[in-house]
Amino acid sequence: MSTNIKENLDNITSRIFKATRKAGRDPSEVTLLAASKTMELKQIKEAIAAGVRVFGENYVQEAKEKIEKTARKPVAWHFIGHLQKNKAKLAVELFDMIESVDSIELATELNKKAKTAEKTLNILIEVNLAKEKSKGGVTPKQVDKLVKKANELSNIKVKGLMAIPPYTENPEHVRPYFIALRRIAERINREKIPGVFLNELSMGMSSDFEVAIEEGATIVRVGTAIFGERKPKTK
Ligand SMILES: *Cc1c(COP(=O)(O)O)cnc(C)c1O
């Protein structure tokens, strides 16, 4: 894989375009989120120059420096990692969206901090589709309850669902998980809960974003295919 960020992005953008066309969707319905954990500020700036407008970070402290040293606009930052409650305040200050909310306790804490900061925080509910112990997220059965409860919080807006399905070599093997996530959102939308409409489906990574788009992804989170391989974390 090339480490030329501009070249990689051009390639991914055209693949996104083709996948949306194949699915009969409009390319504007899909946002490319650059998953930039472990990447240096220099690479992030390169990606911004090449047209990236949304970044996803997994560690609050690591993201803080990058966000502060980057002109905020026109770039948005999403949190996509496991969020500890004691980082909620900083996360609310830094991020435009928290994609990985998986408990009412976390949602409540985020709401409290958002209230103090006088902002409305957009969130996604993370769903653990294969019930993997190593990953965060609520089980498919718990989604309804969490969406309804989070929806009652004054400074939280639930925009949709996010999932990190099990990794397999063959993206076709992940397709059923993408379908499952879409169906959960469709089912909840049919309930017509006042104030609830799940628009966003954050699913698909470097190895499978085209399949995710075919199944309705509105946000694809791509790291390696943009930046090249990550260096192993040394903490
Ligand atoms: C790192 C990461 C990605 C991107 O993974 P790649 O395989 O490098 O594209 C997507 N989503 C989450 C939650 C991540 O942590």
Image (cartoon, rainbow, N blue to C red):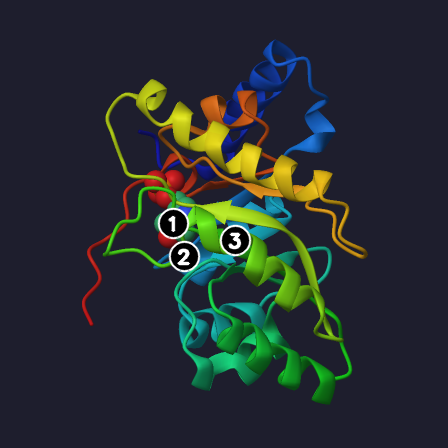
Which disc number belongs to residue 155?
A: none
Where is residue 114, by image quadrant?
Answer: bottom right
Q: Earlier in the sequence, mark 1 or mark 3?
A: 1
N-terminal label among 2 and 3: 2
Q: Residue at x 55, y 39 (%)?
A: 184
User: How far separated are the C-alphas under marks 2 and 1?
Assistant: 5 Å
Q: Secondary structure at mark 3?
A: helix
Residue identifier under label 3? 143
Between label 2 and label 3, give the one nearer the viewer.
3
Q: Quick one: SS at disc 1?
A: loop
Q: Kindly identify the amino acid type of the residue bearing the numbered disc 2.
A: Gly
Residue 225 in percent (x, y) is at 39, 34
Residue 128's disc number: 1
The quadrant in which the C terminus is found is bottom left
User: Is 129 positioned to the left or the right of 201 in the image?
Assistant: left
Question: Does residue 227 sit above or below 113 in this rendering?
Answer: above
Q: Nearer the viewer, residue 3 or 112?
A: 112
Q: CA distance from mark 1 to mark 3?
A: 10 Å
Residue 176 seen from this side: yes
Give the foreground label among 1 and 3: 3
Residue count near mark 1 (Cα–Cα under 10 Å), binned few <14, some 14–19, many ≥20: many
Q: Name the residue at 73% across, 22% down.
A: 26
Count residues near mark 2 (Cα–Cα under 10 Å), then give few for <14, some for 14-19, many for 20+.
Answer: many
